[in-house]
Amino acid sequence: MEHPILFISFILEKLGLPIPHGPVGDTLLAKIVSPHLTYTWLVMAFLIIVPKLTMGKMEMIPGKGQNFWEMIIGGLEGFMAENMGEEGARMMFPMLTTFAFYILTANMIGLMPGFMSPTSNINITLGCTLIVFTTTHILGLKFHGVKYIKHFMGPIPWLIPLMFPIEVISHLARILSLSIRLFGNIMAKETLLGILFLLAGAFFAPLPILFLGVFVSIVQALVFVLLSILYFSGSMEHAH
């Protein structure tokens, strides 16, 4: 799916610098200005600048912006504490909150004509998933040491030859589950919106799909973070 606006390519053109064409990966410049990375930078800039502008300095008597962010951050922290315990929530809060804001913003930005959701690229969703997958097992080893292997053994010793490969496969399947679910839903949303905008010739015809796109964007961000919380909490709890 082609996206008509690519900001860094536009800037390069205005500066008279060469714009790479052909498959991404031919040159270093092609990698730098690839669409999913370009819009990832845009999402990062948004998440850095907007909270700074809306919140300003922390005050004892908070204003509207500070109240808004305290409500969002407090709600996320409470939700994580309920599902992971105080210690786990305190430890994983920065990572999970970053995932929540990044995925939600990346999903939503594709609803604007000419923009794309970075999460409609499998490389982005796979990268996020590999971070979650690796962190899950690091937490397991941190909390249990070598005994973490008991999570893969099953409840009865004579079932170990059966349960161990099943558990290993189920953990590896999480990589496909997290990455392809997010990628597939957002890519489908992007493709459908692109087709409707081309066919409708106006911005009002696809409005029902835009509302559906907002719903899908929020749900997919919530599902990714919720599953990450469940994986983390499962690796930290004792095996039964």
Image (tube, helix red, strand yellow):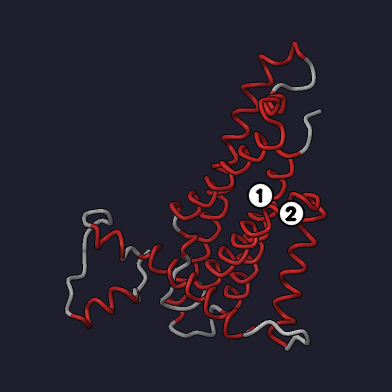
- Quarter residue 73 falls in: bottom right
Left or right of 30? Residue 197 is: right
Q: Position of residue 106 (x, y in %)?
A: 52, 67
In the rendered image, which residue does mark 2 sit on? 89
For the point 80% across and 50% down, the residue is: 85
Left or right of 164? Residue 32 is: left
Element carrying mark 1 = helix
Q: Nearer the viewer, residue 95 or 214?
A: 95
Marks 2 and 1 sit apart, C-alpha to C-alpha, by: 12 Å
Q: Amino acid at mark 1?
A: Ser
Q: Amino acid at mark 2?
A: Ala
For the point 75% across and 82% down, the residue is: 67
Image: 22 above or below 133:
below
For the point 49% across and 71% down, the residue is: 43
Element carrying mark 2 = helix
Q: Nearer the viewer, residue 172 or 234?
A: 234
Q: Position of residue 111 (x, y in %)?
A: 52, 74
